[in-house]
Structures are given as C-alpha cells and as structure tokens.
Image (spheres, rainbow, N blue to C red):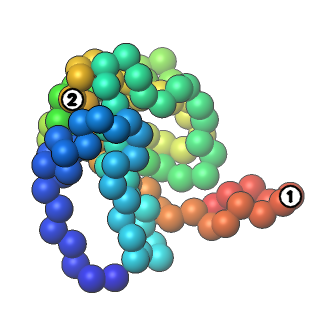
Amino acid sequence: MEGILLDMARVAAEAADRRGTVWTLSGSWELNANLLRFPAGTGVKEHTNEAVDVLLVGVTGEGLVRIGGDEHRLRPGVLVAVPKGVRRSLSSLSEDFSCLSVHRRRGPLLPGRPPG
C-alpha cells in the first residue's frame, strides 16, 4: 500500500448527493477505513458487530453514536471507540454529517465460521 493524503471534508462535500460509504481505503491487507456520509435522520440502524472494535472519527456536521445505553455526539475531530459485541447505531443530526470508520480488516465470511 502506498501512503495516502486525503482531505476527508472535501471528499464528503463533493459527495453531497450520496449516502453511506463515499470513500474506501484500498490496498491495505490490515486496515479497513471508510468515509461515511449521511443526510439528517439517516445512518446505520442498531446492530451488534461481534467481529471487530471500530473507531469513528467525526469529519463534518454532527452525528449521534449509541453504544449500549450511552449516547455520544460525534463532531469534527471527535473520536468514539466502539467495542465489539455491543449494540450500536449511528445517525446524522445534520445535513452534512460524515465520519471516518476504521477497524482491523476482517477475514472472508465462510459458511459455518464466524467472521474475524
């Protein structure tokens, strides 16, 4: 993998008509990183990820991360660490919310074997 310099706020702004993943790190066998963008009132529904811990870093706007019973505001420059095995959700509180999601790359999903 080559080094990467990315203006995440610019990428998010240029993707104003898109929702979900607007950029993905390519070329790394160890990291999975995605720039996510959601308009107000949308996001990722509550779920449990049993495979990996996840870091969320606010890039633009404001979002809400729910981890178990706790709520955390995600704004530019704010980092939230989400442990595996805990119920979580992510929702946009502003029209221009984006965040970076980073975790250890998971192995392939194989029948009869849990991921990770």
**Label 2, residues with CA under 10 Å away: few <14, some 14-19, many ≥20:** many
The residue tagged 1 is 112
User: Quick one: 86 or 91, which is closer to the camera?
Assistant: 91
Picture quadrant where residue 18 is located: top left
**Is residue 72 shown to the viewer in this render?**
no
Picture coordinates of residue 11 (x, y %)? Answer: 20, 50
Q: Which mark is residue 33?
A: none
Left or right: residue 13 compared with residue 98: left
Mark closest to the chain's N terminus, 1 or 2? 2
* Residue that lies at the very extreme toward the bottom in this rendered image: 2
User: Quick one: 49 or 62, which is closer to the camera?
Assistant: 62
Left or right: residue 84 compared with residue 1: right
**Label 1, residues with CA under 10 Å away: few <14, some 14-19, many ≥20:** few
Left or right: residue 39 compared with residue 50: left
Q: Residue at x 48, y 50 (%)?
A: 53
The residue tagged 2 is 96
User: Quick one: 59 or 42, which is closer to the camera?
Assistant: 42
Q: CA distance from mark 1 to mark 2?
A: 40 Å
Q: Is 32 located above or below residue 68 in the figure?
A: below
Q: Tag 1, which secondary structure?
A: loop
Question: What is the quadrant of the C terminus in the image?
Answer: bottom right
* Residue that lies at the very extreme toward the right in this rendered image: 112
Picture quadrant where residue 102 is located: bottom left
Q: Residue at x 57, y 63 (%)?
A: 106
Q: Amino acid at mark 1?
A: Gly
Left or right: residue 33 compared with residue 60: right
Picture coordinates of residue 26 (x, y %)? Answer: 39, 70
Q: Tag 2, which secondary structure?
A: loop
Q: Amino acid at mark 2?
A: Asp
